[in-house]
Image: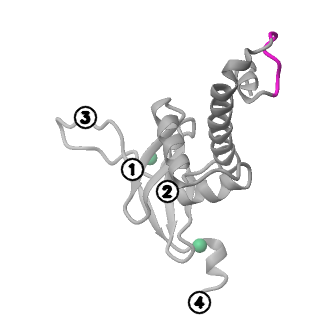
Amino acid sequence: MSYIESIALGTMSPGRERPITNDIRINTMKRNTSQREAIKAVFEKERRALCIEEVLSGGQHLVKSLNQATVYRNLKLLVDEGWLKKWHHPIRGSMYEPTDLAHHHHFHCRICEHIYEIEGCLLDPSAKTPAGFLTEAHDVFLYGVCPTCRKTVP
Ligand SMILES: [Zn+2]
Ligand SMILES: [Zn+2]
Protein backbone atom coordinates (compact mmCIF):
# COMPACT_ATOMS: atom_id res chain seq x y z
CA MET A 1 0.00 0.00 0.00
CA SER A 2 1.38 3.40 -0.93
CA TYR A 3 1.53 6.37 1.42
CA ILE A 4 -1.23 8.16 -0.53
CA GLU A 5 -3.48 5.07 -0.38
CA SER A 6 -2.82 4.82 3.35
CA ILE A 7 -3.99 8.41 3.81
CA ALA A 8 -7.09 7.76 1.72
CA LEU A 9 -7.88 4.68 3.82
CA GLY A 10 -7.38 6.66 7.01
CA THR A 11 -4.72 4.28 8.33
CA MET A 12 -2.05 6.97 8.30
CA SER A 13 -2.26 10.61 9.36
CA PRO A 14 -1.79 13.06 6.50
CA GLY A 15 0.00 15.37 8.95
CA ARG A 16 -2.72 17.99 9.40
CA GLU A 17 -6.20 18.02 10.86
CA ARG A 18 -8.92 17.68 8.24
CA PRO A 19 -11.70 20.31 8.33
CA ILE A 20 -14.88 19.06 10.05
CA THR A 21 -17.04 20.42 7.19
CA ASN A 22 -15.43 17.92 4.84
CA ASP A 23 -16.27 14.89 6.98
CA ILE A 24 -19.19 13.67 4.88
CA ARG A 25 -17.24 13.98 1.65
CA ILE A 26 -14.21 12.29 3.22
CA ASN A 27 -16.35 9.48 4.63
CA THR A 28 -17.86 8.88 1.19
CA MET A 29 -14.40 8.92 -0.35
CA LYS A 30 -13.11 6.58 2.37
CA ARG A 31 -15.95 4.13 1.75
CA ASN A 32 -15.37 4.17 -2.02
CA THR A 33 -11.65 3.73 -1.48
CA SER A 34 -12.07 0.80 0.88
CA GLN A 35 -14.52 -0.85 -1.54
CA ARG A 36 -11.96 -0.49 -4.27
CA GLU A 37 -9.16 -1.74 -2.00
CA ALA A 38 -11.27 -4.78 -1.10
CA ILE A 39 -11.79 -5.57 -4.79
CA LYS A 40 -8.08 -5.17 -5.48
CA ALA A 41 -7.32 -7.44 -2.51
CA VAL A 42 -9.54 -10.17 -4.00
CA PHE A 43 -7.57 -10.07 -7.26
CA GLU A 44 -4.24 -9.92 -5.42
CA LYS A 45 -5.19 -13.06 -3.49
CA GLU A 46 -6.58 -15.00 -6.48
CA ARG A 47 -4.22 -13.77 -9.25
CA ARG A 48 -6.62 -15.02 -11.94
CA ALA A 49 -9.58 -13.97 -14.08
CA LEU A 50 -12.77 -13.46 -12.08
CA CYS A 51 -16.38 -12.70 -12.98
CA ILE A 52 -18.43 -10.06 -11.13
CA GLU A 53 -20.10 -12.66 -8.87
CA GLU A 54 -16.73 -14.07 -7.80
CA VAL A 55 -15.40 -10.57 -7.03
CA LEU A 56 -18.59 -9.80 -5.10
CA SER A 57 -18.48 -12.92 -2.92
CA GLY A 58 -14.73 -12.54 -2.29
CA GLY A 59 -15.01 -8.81 -1.55
CA GLN A 60 -17.96 -9.12 0.83
CA HIS A 61 -15.72 -10.99 3.27
CA LEU A 62 -13.71 -7.75 3.52
CA VAL A 63 -16.34 -5.01 3.07
CA LYS A 64 -19.94 -5.96 3.90
CA SER A 65 -21.43 -2.94 2.07
CA LEU A 66 -20.36 -4.31 -1.30
CA ASN A 67 -23.18 -5.12 -3.70
CA GLN A 68 -23.36 -5.88 -7.40
CA ALA A 69 -23.70 -2.18 -8.37
CA THR A 70 -20.73 -1.02 -6.28
CA VAL A 71 -18.60 -3.91 -7.52
CA TYR A 72 -19.52 -3.15 -11.13
CA ARG A 73 -18.73 0.57 -10.69
CA ASN A 74 -15.37 -0.12 -9.04
CA LEU A 75 -14.41 -2.75 -11.63
CA LYS A 76 -15.10 -0.19 -14.34
CA LEU A 77 -12.92 2.39 -12.54
CA LEU A 78 -10.09 -0.12 -12.19
CA VAL A 79 -10.35 -0.93 -15.90
CA ASP A 80 -10.29 2.80 -16.75
CA GLU A 81 -7.20 3.21 -14.53
CA GLY A 82 -5.51 0.36 -16.37
CA TRP A 83 -5.23 -1.84 -13.25
CA LEU A 84 -7.69 -4.42 -14.55
CA LYS A 85 -8.38 -5.76 -18.01
CA LYS A 86 -11.91 -6.75 -19.03
CA TRP A 87 -12.36 -9.50 -21.59
CA HIS A 88 -15.08 -11.82 -22.80
CA HIS A 89 -15.13 -15.58 -22.29
CA PRO A 90 -17.33 -17.50 -24.76
CA ILE A 91 -19.13 -19.33 -21.91
CA ARG A 92 -18.60 -17.27 -18.76
CA GLY A 93 -19.07 -13.81 -20.32
CA SER A 94 -17.35 -10.73 -18.87
CA MET A 95 -14.17 -11.52 -16.95
CA TYR A 96 -11.70 -9.24 -15.19
CA GLU A 97 -8.03 -9.86 -14.47
CA PRO A 98 -5.03 -7.77 -13.32
CA THR A 99 -3.17 -6.22 -16.26
CA ASP A 100 0.20 -7.15 -14.75
CA LEU A 101 -0.29 -10.90 -15.33
CA ALA A 102 2.19 -12.24 -17.90
CA HIS A 103 0.85 -13.58 -21.21
CA HIS A 104 -1.18 -16.73 -20.52
CA HIS A 105 -4.23 -18.69 -21.64
CA HIS A 106 -7.44 -19.82 -20.00
CA PHE A 107 -8.82 -23.26 -19.22
CA HIS A 108 -12.54 -23.55 -18.52
CA CYS A 109 -13.72 -26.53 -16.46
CA ARG A 110 -17.21 -27.60 -17.60
CA ILE A 111 -17.94 -29.18 -14.19
CA CYS A 112 -17.02 -26.43 -11.69
CA GLU A 113 -17.11 -23.55 -14.24
CA HIS A 114 -13.81 -22.31 -12.84
CA ILE A 115 -11.47 -20.51 -15.22
CA TYR A 116 -7.83 -21.48 -14.65
CA GLU A 117 -4.82 -19.48 -15.77
CA ILE A 118 -2.48 -21.59 -17.90
CA GLU A 119 0.98 -20.06 -17.68
CA GLY A 120 2.99 -19.30 -20.78
CA CYS A 121 1.92 -19.52 -24.43
CA LEU A 122 0.36 -22.65 -25.93
CA LEU A 123 0.52 -21.53 -29.55
CA ASP A 124 2.96 -23.21 -31.88
CA PRO A 125 5.52 -20.48 -32.62
CA SER A 126 6.07 -21.98 -36.08
CA ALA A 127 2.41 -21.34 -36.98
CA LYS A 128 2.56 -18.24 -39.11
CA THR A 129 -0.17 -15.99 -40.45
CA PRO A 130 -0.34 -15.60 -44.23
CA ALA A 131 1.79 -12.90 -45.81
CA GLY A 132 0.34 -9.43 -45.34
CA PHE A 133 -1.29 -10.07 -41.95
CA LEU A 134 0.07 -8.28 -38.89
CA THR A 135 -0.90 -10.24 -35.77
CA GLU A 136 -1.10 -8.01 -32.71
CA ALA A 137 -2.67 -10.30 -30.10
CA HIS A 138 -4.32 -13.68 -29.64
CA ASP A 139 -6.58 -15.54 -27.22
CA VAL A 140 -6.64 -19.28 -26.62
CA PHE A 141 -9.52 -20.88 -24.73
CA LEU A 142 -9.18 -24.45 -23.51
CA TYR A 143 -12.19 -26.48 -22.36
CA GLY A 144 -12.41 -29.65 -20.33
CA VAL A 145 -12.31 -30.95 -16.78
CA CYS A 146 -9.95 -29.69 -14.08
CA PRO A 147 -7.85 -32.07 -11.89
CA THR A 148 -10.15 -31.60 -8.88
CA CYS A 149 -13.30 -32.45 -10.85
CA ARG A 150 -11.62 -35.38 -12.60
CA LYS A 151 -11.41 -37.07 -9.21
CA THR A 152 -15.20 -36.89 -8.86
CA VAL A 153 -16.35 -37.65 -12.43
CA PRO A 154 -15.61 -40.88 -14.34
ZN1 LIG B 1 -13.45 -28.29 -12.18
ZN1 LIG C 1 -0.32 -17.18 -26.24
**Predominant secondary structure, magenta span:** loop
Q: Residue furthest front?
A: 21
Looking at the image, residue 78 sits to the left or right of residue 17; the answer is left
Q: Residue at x 64, y 72 (%)?
A: 147
Structural crowding at the residue carrying mark 1, measured as other residues with C-alpha within 10 Å and reported as few (<14), some (14–19) or many (≥20): few
Sequence-earlier tag: 2 or 3? 2
Rendered view: 86 above or below 33: below
Q: What secondary structure is found at the residue carrying circle 3?
A: loop
Verify CB contact (< 8 Å) between mark 4 and mark 1.
no
Mark 4 → mark 3, Cα distance in angstroms: 44 Å
Q: Residues within 10 Å of mark 4 (few under 14, many from 20)?
A: few
Disc 2 residue type (three-letter)? His
User: Type of residue at label 3?
Assistant: Leu
Identify residue for label 4: 154
User: Is residue 76 or residue 43 the one in the foreground?
Assistant: 76
Magenta span has 102?
no
Q: Which residue is mark 1?
A: 139
Position of residue 42 measured from the top left corner of the image (x, y, whole percent): 67, 48
Name the element at disc 4: loop
Span highlighted in magenta in the image: 11-16
Which residue is drawn at the image coordinates 63% and 44% (left, top)?
39
**If you read the primary sequence from the N terminus, does the residue marked by circle 4 or circle 3 appear first?**
3
Q: Residue at x 55, y 47 (%)?
A: 70
In the rendering, which numbered label is found on residue 65?
none
Q: CA distance from mark 4 to mark 1?
A: 30 Å
Which x, y percent locates residue 75? 51, 43
